[in-house]
Amino acid sequence: MFNRAKAWGLLPETMVNPCREIIRHRSAPRGRLLNQEDLQRLGAVLDRYALIRRDQVDIIRLILLTGCRSGEVYRLRWKEVRRDRLNLADSKTGPRTVLLGEVARNLLQQRRRERKRESPFVFPSPYDLTKPRVCMPYVWRRIRAEAGLADDIRLHDLRHTYASHAVMRGETLMMAGRLLGHRNTITTERYADLADRFLLDAVERVAAEILKLSDPCPS
């Protein structure tokens, strides 16, 4: 609360947070990561739903393509959308910039062409264009079930999936943290085990290849 009050300018920057010495309870990280097969099945279901649940499908895809929090996507305003980036005015960690890949840019450009001019939101409520869409847990549950995903996979896990695949492609934990907008590297440490396991797999593959090449009497 004190950090947020300082970010909003309600408290002076020089004020010492009286809660800074409190040690937080370290609960086990929640969430599941989607592998390549999971993502392929999810993509197929999203393609089927695109005609009947366009907004929800675009929200899910934008989370996957940017690593944004679901709330950041739901509340996204057109004034925050630039050609190659999102300039989020108020994310969980304060203002931040999210760079957009080609697919995400195309998705937003298509929505801009179809934009309801009276709404400031990329995903406006169908009942009140002055407000953003609200959470859609029932739609996600249906899509998740049809894609054969585990029942405990949340929309938020799509954000972590984005970062996990960045790590598995060789990006550093620091880079993964920047992609997710983490202020503290400790928050990104949940991916350390993933990175180690991925590196171990690479070590085993290299060792097997070296053994094969150095075997004087291959079978």
Image (tube, grey):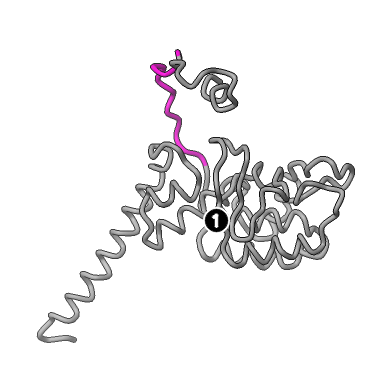
Magenta span: helix, strand or loop, mainly?
loop
Q: Which residue is mark 1?
A: 99
Residue at image location 40% in from the left, 63% down from the top: 169
In the picture, the quarter occupied by the N terminus is top right
Residue 190 lies in what quarter of the image? top left
* 58 vs 131, nearest the viewer: 131
Label 1 neighbour load within 10 Å: few <14, some 14-19, many 20+: some
Residue 27 magenta: yes
Residue 105 lies in what quarter of the image? bottom right
Magenta stretch, residue numbers: 18-30
Does 142 sit left or right of 93 as displayed? right
* 92 vs 146, nearest the viewer: 92
Residue at image location 44% in from the left, 58% down from the top: 166
Q: Tell me residue 90's x, y (percent).
A: 62, 37
In the depicted structure, whether residue 28 falls above or below residue 83: above
Residue farthest to the top, as pictured:
18
Q: Tell me residue 80's x, y (percent).
A: 67, 48
Q: Tell me residue 4's x, y (percent).
A: 56, 25
In the depicted structure, whether residue 162 falls above or below residue 22: below
Residue at image location 83% in from the left, 45% down from the top: 125
Does 212 sit left or right of 183 as displayed? left
Residue farthest to the left, as pictured:
216
How many numbered discs sit on the rendered protein? Answer: 1
Q: Amino acid at mark 1?
A: Leu
Residue 82 lies in what quarter of the image? bottom right
In the picture, the quarter occupied by the C terminus is bottom left
* Disc 1, SS: strand
